[in-house]
Amino acid sequence: MKRYSIITFLVASLVAALSSCNDEFMQRDPIDKMANGTFFVKEVDLQLYLDGIYRYYVYGHGIGGTNNTSHDKGFLPVKAGSQIIFADAFSDNTVYAGGIDGKLGGTYDTPTAASKNFDTPWQWEKLRKVNYFLNHYTEVGDPEDLKGYAAQAYFFKAWDYYIKLVALGEVPWLDKELDTASPELYGARMPRTELVGKILECFDFAVANLDDNDNSCGYINQDMALFLKSRFCLFEGTFRKYHTELNLQSTANGFFEMSRDAAKRIIDKNRYSLFKNAAGDGYWQLFIQKGSPETEGNTETILSRVYDGVKLGHDNPRYWGMNNHTRYCLGAPICVLEDYLCEDGRPIYIGGTAGNYEVNPLFKGYDGMWEELDNRDPRLRQTIDKPGEADSKASIFDMDDDTYGIEETGVIYPMIIYDTGGGSPMKHYNSTVTGYRFIKHWMPDYPEWEANPNGVQTAHMFRYGELLLIYAEARAELNEITNEDLNLTINALRERAGFDFTKYPNAKLTLSNIPADPRLDAIYAEKLDYSVSPILREIRRERRVETMIEGMRYEDLMRWKAGKLFTVPVRGMKMTPEKTELYSKNRNDETYKDFPFMVTVPIAEVGNQVRVDGEGFIIPYPTSTTVINGVRPWDDKRYYYPIPLNEMLMNPLLIQNPGWKDINR
């Protein structure tokens, strides 16, 4: 059998683009010019056609003005900015300015029609492009010699159906590019077991026929296919295990084994390692890199999208930085902070019961000035800013004169904002709903902000850190995890983050040293209809912390049948006397650079500007009629999204997902 190589068939300019990890090939879109039976003439046409498909799946931080870009997972309300970052706006990881989205607030209903844009899970145009390729690529030669091209298309087909499975559950399986007269348009939804089998066939073809290299910003390779297969199999295994209404629990372990084995194949290649730096903040630095991973000394990234700022760029730095005060303001709620361990590897509460918890001596509580961020998992301060500290990020950056550092800048406290459209002055960039400002992915780089829409911040889509979490969870679900596995995965992630195992040996997780967490155990007992072992609890915690603001949390809640975690009350920071005095400063004061800003809202409590609860914590959704006392509503029908009504009118074989409005009522 002839071995396929991308390089063999590319013109010299394209080879140069790939060797430097330039994404020029992702800009090519000859798909719209295709003519049935005439497009594929030469072998080089195959890759040129596939180039036009890449941008639909390897989306990264988007292209150009991402304000007009929809997320690949159209069921997430991502209207602007990075599709990786803002997907977490639809999870319990964040609070979003401007009120509660209908999908989170319980007011979303069955749509009448599927959008023509790629912003709904019930869309088939991308898949049509993939199927066209698979139906016609053999027109230029022997199929055996062209498997490498087909493998890329099968990878995208598996990815497309994976997204649909997460959102909709069972959907029709399509193998042809359809037109309005195609009978397949009126077929039934394929049963889940058959559908998943088809997806696995696509993954297996891709794994068997893709190049085995580590070019993280080139064409799809074997490692990328193994990674996505491992993630998919973990999703399906956990979904089958915990969604007992499917009666598929007995088949879950087979998927855990496939997830484990795919992850281990990558691990055993010894190509990847966690990114570290001398400053000890490698976790934060990873997400603000520019250029190809190899130029940054980064061997963690398995799949990335790289931008050159000339032929290909984006405006994520602007929307995650400068314009954070307008349409895209996210803040962390208290319930997120409480999941982070203290630096000794134990949670903030180490014993007792609600109302009478035994407090970890390292935890400073919520009084004072953001001291709750001290003595914690180092990733907390690399994800959420502590204003005024020498190692702060956002609060010691002055974009007006592009200075960075507490001596040069002073302190710019985070603005607290309920609505959108903060206006000027530009220091409103340092904004949040809750008082806790996310700084993961955020770079103090004014020229990069001004480069809009030609930013070059690298988008890491598949990374080794997540792969380690997948492997650990699969092993734990199979009841075969060992201390060696924990050292390879959880403890390696903690060590990279900055945990000091010499000072706190018990911060290293072992099977005989799993900390008690009465707070989190009580939440699981109340919100879940199954028990979670201590080791799985810690792996789930680690996953939430490590992948914060990477768009994974919603999918995790769905596969764990943990939607009721949305109802854990959300609160912002405590408005202590010190903070109340600080935030009472006049926003028009000439010395505003040293003080926070506020936006007046209709309801008045603290300083006529912020509403708080009886304990002094900020209420994130003060005007919402569906979020009461910080509790967001949940309905089990939200484990799937609805099929648009018009689709059911056109195809009577389609059956609506449970609980959603259909054409008969």
Image (cartoon, grey):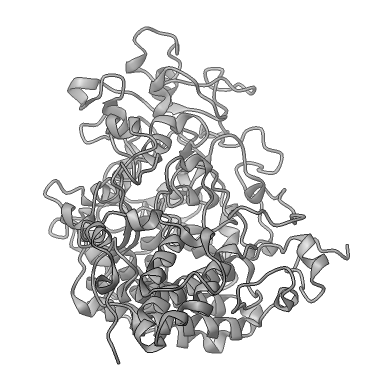
Q: Is residue 157 above or below residue 504?
A: below
| Residue 344, quarter of the rendered image | bottom left
Of 21 and 16, nearer the camera is 16
Q: Viewer-proximal residue, 184 or 473?
A: 184
Residue 143 left/right relative to 355: left
Rendered position, 47 above or below 475: above
Q: Is residue 413 visible?
A: yes
Image position, residue 311 (x, y; %): 33, 45
Q: Is residue 406 left or right of residue 90?
A: left
Q: Position of residue 547 (x, y in %)?
A: 38, 57
Q: Is residue 454 left or right of residue 319?
A: left
Residues 522 and 119: in front is: 119
Q: Name which residue lies at 25% across and 46% down.
A: 290
The answer to whether residue 508 shows anywhere in this view is: no
Most distant residue in the top direction: 590
Along the viewing direction, whichever of 136 and 457 lies nearer the viewer: 136
Quadrant holding the N terminus: bottom left
- List the single residue furthest toward the right: 664
Look at 60% across and 60% down and name the residue there: 564
Q: Residue 149: x percent and y percent?
A: 38, 76
Which quarter shows the C terminus? bottom right
